[in-house]
Image (cartoon, rainbow, N blue to C red):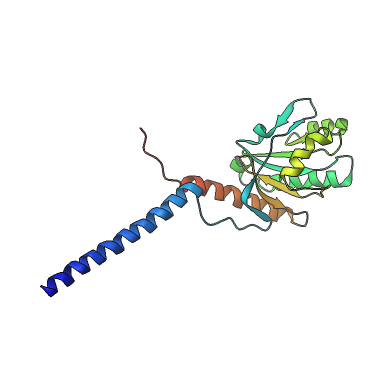
Amino acid sequence: MFVRNRHHFGVRLVLAIGAMALFVLGYQWGNQYRFGSTAPPEIRGVLIQPPGEIPEFGLRDPFGRSVGRADLVGSWTLLAFGDLAEATGQRAAQRLIETRNRLSDRPELIERLQLILVQTSERLELARDFARLSPVLRPLAGPPESIAPLHEGLGLVSGVGPMLFVIGPDARLRAILPETESGAAMAEDVKALMASDRISVSASPSLPRP
């Protein structure tokens, strides 16, 4: 009788351990489904976790077309601030284009990337000429009160140098690439961020169709 009770106790213990293991696996699976890959990408720039929400804003390109937050959805965006009539703005534009050019070995990434330079002045003549010469770069402009939401959403309180902001296809800030980072390093950071996003999506289990 005593031996039989020990046997039943051992069976119950095994079942309890199995139930706990299933709970842990289910918890991990649920987290993976909700948040994607748990390992953040390794980059030289500043990784923003959790990604920061980009607020609504309203600017215009040199040809009068309006651009807002909705235009960031669906594509990766490299964004910078600067006046093309000044050295800082020219440097910011150069860094944007250089980063894109260093992705030339990955044309599928270039297709998913847009470059935006937010003009810190409303002088659109130079921006219009620049946009014609370099169509890969999209200069935007607007009055200070239209640029302010972007400044606040990116955590800026004053003028910035030629740092780049990496915005994901969900219109959230993913990383900041400081002005000390080289073009090659910035390109590698962009590759890592895009790759991590694809892994997160593919890691989410497919739900059965109704």
The x and y percentages for residue 32 are 46, 51
Instruction: Identify the residue at horizontal 17%, vertical 67% (top origin).
Output: 8
- Residue 176 seen anywhere in this rendered image of the structure: yes
Is 21 located above or below residue 141 in the figure?
below
- In the picture, the quarter occupied by the N terminus is bottom left
- In the picture, the quarter occupied by the C terminus is top left
In the visual, does 26 lie left or right of 154? Answer: left
Q: Nearer the viewer, residue 44 or 172?
A: 172
Outermost residue toward the top in this view: 64
Q: Nearer the viewer, residue 178 or 28?
A: 28
Q: Nearer the viewer, residue 49 or 168?
A: 49
Instruction: Identify the residue at horizontal 72%, vertical 52% (top origin).
Output: 177
How many dots with numbers? 0
The x and y percentages for residue 104 are 66, 45
The x and y percentages for residue 97 are 74, 44
Instruction: Identify the residue at horizontal 66%, vertical 32% (top origin).
Output: 71
Q: Nearer the viewer, residue 197 or 188?
A: 197
The x and y percentages for residue 149 are 75, 39
> Which quadrant of the figure has residue 21?
bottom left
- Residue 97 seen anywhere in this rendered image of the structure: no
In the visual, does 54 lie left or right of 145? Answer: left
Instruction: Identify the residue at horizontal 83%, vertical 33% (top origin).
Output: 143
Is 178 located above or below residue 204 in the figure?
below
Outermost residue toward the bottom in this view: 2
